[in-house]
Image (spheres, rainbow, N blue to C red):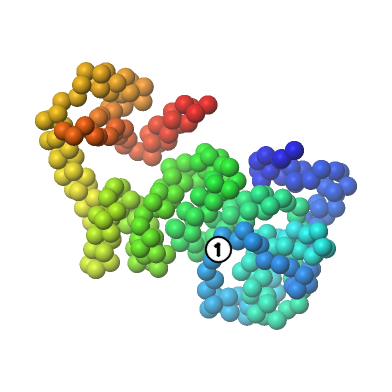
């Protein structure tokens, strides 16, 4: 039977018997030294870029003082080991030319292996926003987590998780710009509020070309949204909402405890707008949607 939510329940969630628990607890507490050539890399490693200069610096540090933080591995069926977390340390150790590396040994199924690798990866300080967003999305898709589950796993607010995942909706060119530090997370969060990808790219290129501040970009996005809203309002005034739409709008406003609005043009297409004024209110609205699923 599958073990659920193992990551947050400690060692006993990963193993079955007291004998196994005592053995693995000893390895986890003390760590052991493993021949480097007996360790294969983690096939689920979410990190795709390793800076050569920082690896060389870490390798030199390893030569001088050794490895302070052991890597984490699991034993494979053939008696060798597979990396769970610590690929940067493993790579640097190989560069340093050492033959054995300190490691904690854990028992983990592939799903748990992926989850632990991703969660550790997300906590790194040198990740760009897109790498974090990809890790969040993989945790949700491949470990069957909801955004609420994910926020608890990584210790971040639900709205923060949502903001990162939204970045993956941006055109590839903008995502690459985030990774190459041409724009910041603040710039990207403003751009993602624009619905039209062509307008997103236009603003992105303007930011790169003229070095706009985040505040200036947010101002431009607000002005763009206002012009679009005024245009849609003009269209909707020419096409009044049917009575059933008005009833539904009032019902939804009461249900979400906020002023829900309908936008409908003269061609009959439109959208439902549920406004919020803070991250806390957004989380409240999302929680209402989640309750509808159960």
- From the viewer's side, name the closer residue of 135 and 172: 172
Query: Residue 27, image x and y in percent?
Result: 80, 57
Q: Tell me where residue 258 sits by quadrant.
A: top left
- Please indicate whether residue 262 sits to the left or right of residue 47 in the image: left
Q: Residues within 10 Å of mark 1 (few under 14, many from 20)?
A: some
The residue positioned farthest toward the front in the image shown: 267
Q: Residue at x 19, y 24 (%)?
A: 241
The residue under the point 43% across, 42% down is: 159
The answer to whether 67 is drawn above or below residue 13 in the figure is: below
Q: Which residue in the structure is indicated by mark 1?
A: 47
* As drawn, 262 above or below 15: above
Instruction: Indicate the position of residue 169 as horizontal and vertical percent values.
Output: 39, 51
Task: Tell me if residue 169 comes above or below residue 285 in the rendering.
Answer: below
Image position, residue 149 (x, y; %): 56, 40
Q: Going by the picture, which residue comes out furthest to the right?
A: 19
Can residue 199 be seen from the camera position used here?
A: yes
Task: Indicate left or right for 200 with 285 as reference.
Answer: left
Label 1: element kind: loop
């Amino acid at each position: 039977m599958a073990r659920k939510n193992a990551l947050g329940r400690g060692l006993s969630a990963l193993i079955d018997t007291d004998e196994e628990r005592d053995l693995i607890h000893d390895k986890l507490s003390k760590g052991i030294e493993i021949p480097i050539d007996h360790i294969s890399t983690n096939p689920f490693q979410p990190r795709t870029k390793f800076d050569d200069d920082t690896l060389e610096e870490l390798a030199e540090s390893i030569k001088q003082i050794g490895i302070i933080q052991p890597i984490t591995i699991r034993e494979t069926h053939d008696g060798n080991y597979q990396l769970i977390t610590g690929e940067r340390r493993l790579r640097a150790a190989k560069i340093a030319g050492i033959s054995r590396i300190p490691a904690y040994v854990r028992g983990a199924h592939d799903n748990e292996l992926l989850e632990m690798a991703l969660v550790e990866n997300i906590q790194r300080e040198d990740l760009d926003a897109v790498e974090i967003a990809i890790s969040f999305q993989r945790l949700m898709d491949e470990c069957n987590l909801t955004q609420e589950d994910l926020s608890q796993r990584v210790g971040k607010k639900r709205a923060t998780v949502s903001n990162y995942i939204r970045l993956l909706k941006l055109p590839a060119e903008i995502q690459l710009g985030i990774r190459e530090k041409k724009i910041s997370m603040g710039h990207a969060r403003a751009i993602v509020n624009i619905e039209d990808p062509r307008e997103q790219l236009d603003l992105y290129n303007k930011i790169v070309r003229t070095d706009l501040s985040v505040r200036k970009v947010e101002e431009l996005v607000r002005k763009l949204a206002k012009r679009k809203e005024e245009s849609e309002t003009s269209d909707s005034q020419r096409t009044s909402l049917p009575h059933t739409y008005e009833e539904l709008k009032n019902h939804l406003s009461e249900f979400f405890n906020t002023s829900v609005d309908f936008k409908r043009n003269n061609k009959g297409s439109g959208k439902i707008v549920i406004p919020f004024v803070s991250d806390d209110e957004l989380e409240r609205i999302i929680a209402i949607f989640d309750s509808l699923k159960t």
